Image (spheres, rainbow, N blue to C red):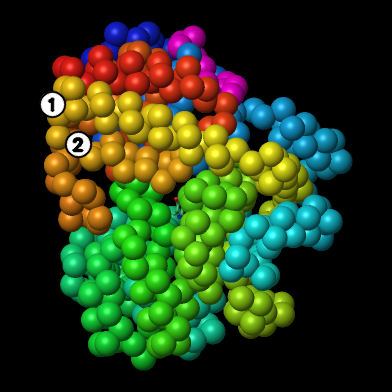
Amino acid sequence: MSTPTKTSINQQRSIAAFDRASGLMPGGVNSPARAFGAVGGKPLFIERAEGPFLFDIDGNRLLDYIGSWGPMILGHAHPVVIEAIQSAASRGTSYGAPTEAETELAELIVEAVPSVEKLRLVNSGTEATMSAIRLARGATGRDQVIKFSGNYHGHVDSLLVAAGSSAANLGVPDSPGVTEGTSRDTLILEYNDVGALQAAFDKHGQELACVILEPVVGNMGCVPPRPGFLEAARELCTKHGAVLIFDEVMTGFRVAYGGAQQRFGVTPDLTTLGKIVGGGLPVGAYGGRADLMDQVLPAGKVFQAGTLSGNPLATAAGAAMLKLLRDDSPYPYLEEQGQRLADGLTRAASRAGIPHQLQRVGSMMTLFFCDQAVHGWTEASTCNRERFAKYFWGMVERGVYMPCSQFEALFFSATHTAEHIDQTIDAAEAVLQDV
Ligand SMILES: *Cc1c(COP(=O)(O)O)cnc(C)c1O
């Protein structure tokens, strides 16, 4: 969207900061979603965060529904997590040698996530999915990968192919720099379409290394799996000897402590994690069946390495976060407040007479401005993005920081109180009246 929307909040310093950054970094940012491309205008620069709030450099306080795009399930600057990082930092920041902290985080993940018997820690979700795909190909000796349009798995070349189509088209690259050769081995299907998945296996069953999917999609807005979809993927992979990969970088420790696989009772062969497992520091992980993971170097031959993998600060933050989640489960509370927020946003949109779909799983949800249930990219792409941009800025003016795209799920934390949720609903009531 090209026209910056005028806002009445004070953005003077943020605008100056953005202009300065724009001379030095492409688009002024280090990750594109931060640049507000989908809603117009210029981004807010953040000075600090605490609990459910962000504080920008102009002194605005914002009730945060991005949560660093997922990790902040216990709110910002949780004292236990911060203390764990400080304590680790005082003992040095990286050794390039094994530590017990890595084993502790690995144990916590193995205990929590049903599919994970063994795992490898990496530094981002992208690294996790890239490595999982390599392992699936190495283990099966096959090349082809099935992914679903509207599912995002990080900026891995072979997965930057999303051109929406419900047929098993040969992939067309989504980005300059991704070669046709790379994307040729990626088949794109429509999410939640069991028939298309069945057909793809009928045709390519012998060449398929793996199926990778978000078990609840967060990256086209919140799209839950339809009953039977995950089960069908499981069954077809087993039958044809392909590896089933759940990309739980977003859903892991978010929709349940054991992730979507625990919530929906379907166990993949490999799982990728990120976001919450790092407690706000850069961590990713891939893990699964021990016989598969034992094919990774140095136990096996599939190459994967990382200078800062299992970094002491990151593992300390991750372990502190997971222990908090394990020992004092926030999930019933998040479910309850999620329902409250979903009901309130639905009511606000209905009163304003706006066509909408509210889709939610636990503490992730999206208010889609479209008039049909969103099961895949075909429906998601019909949403009214201009209305979304107005909604976004209207909410910012009322101190509520929603995801800056119709196609990103919102997240809230255990520090969002019923009162915060009600304030958000009141803001939405007002904003939706004139969008
Ligand atoms: C965020 C995300 C990724 C990428 O993780 P990064 O840490 O940004 O590289 C991969 N898959 C899913 C489902 C995600 O939500």
Drawn side of residue 279 relative to residue 340, left or right: right
Residue in front for this viewpoint, 147 or 265: 265
Q: Which residue is mark 1?
A: 353
Residue in the image at 54% along x and 84% along y:
139
Residue in front for this viewpoint, 43 or 114: 114
Q: Where residue 6 appears, x then y in whole percent?
A: 23, 15
Residue in the image at 13% along x and 26% along y:
353
Q: What residue range appears in magenta?
A: 48-60
Q: Is 316 included in the stretch rendered in magenta?
A: no
- 261 vs 335: above or below: below
Drawn side of residue 309 relative to residue 424, left or right: right
Q: Where residue 162 appears, x then y in whole percent?
A: 27, 61
Q: Which residue is mark 2?
A: 356
Residue in front for this viewpoint, 332 or 385: 332
Q: Is 50 included in the stretch rendered in magenta?
A: yes
Q: What is the number of callouts on the image?
A: 2
